[in-house]
Image (cartoon, rainbow, N blue to C red):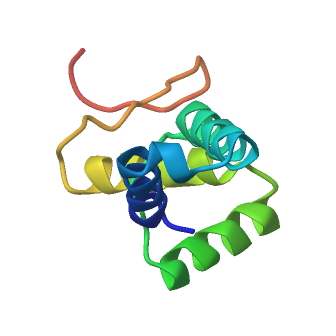
Amino acid sequence: MTRVAFARELESASDAIADVSRADLAIMLRRAAIRLRNAGGADLEPRTDDALASIATEMGIPKGDLVARIIREWLETNAYLPVPHALDEESATEGNA
């Protein structure tokens, strides 16, 4: 269920709170708490979300970390963020410092 659909369900329940059973209300509130706790990004279309989940599994990293990496690399590639340069003692450099 998407976030938008879930929000509609909560709004509908709030409009008819007297008609919602205590058990159903408890379930919806628990689901809302879980969604809020795990909220951390944008809603993606299912194909995109599935592709990211597959790649994250293949790489052995959480999907959120993969998305953060993709965005950071895109920003660096397009000069919106500086590219970090890690120089060690064995790195060759040219020019004036």
Q: Residue at x 41, y 44 (%)?
A: 14
* 10, 64: nearer the viewer: 10
Q: Quadrant of the C terminus?
A: top left
- In the displayed structure, 1 sits above or below 68; it is below
Quarter occupied by residue 35:
top right
Q: Left of 94 or right of it: where is 46? A: right
Please state the horizontal and vertical placement of residue 87, each as a whole percent of the image: 50, 24
Asked if residue 6 can be seen in this view, the reply is yes
- In the displayed structure, 2 sits above or below 94; it is below
Please state the horizontal and vertical placement of residue 15, each as a whole percent of the image: 35, 49
Q: Residue at x 38, y 62 (%)?
A: 4
Q: Residue at x 61, y 25 (%)?
A: 90
* 72, 10: nearer the viewer: 10
Q: Find the residue positioned furthest to the front.
A: 18
* 76, 3: nearer the viewer: 3
Please state the horizontal and vertical placement of residue 24, each as a whole percent of the image: 69, 50
Quarter occupied by residue 51:
bottom right
Asked if residue 69 can be seen in this view, the reply is no
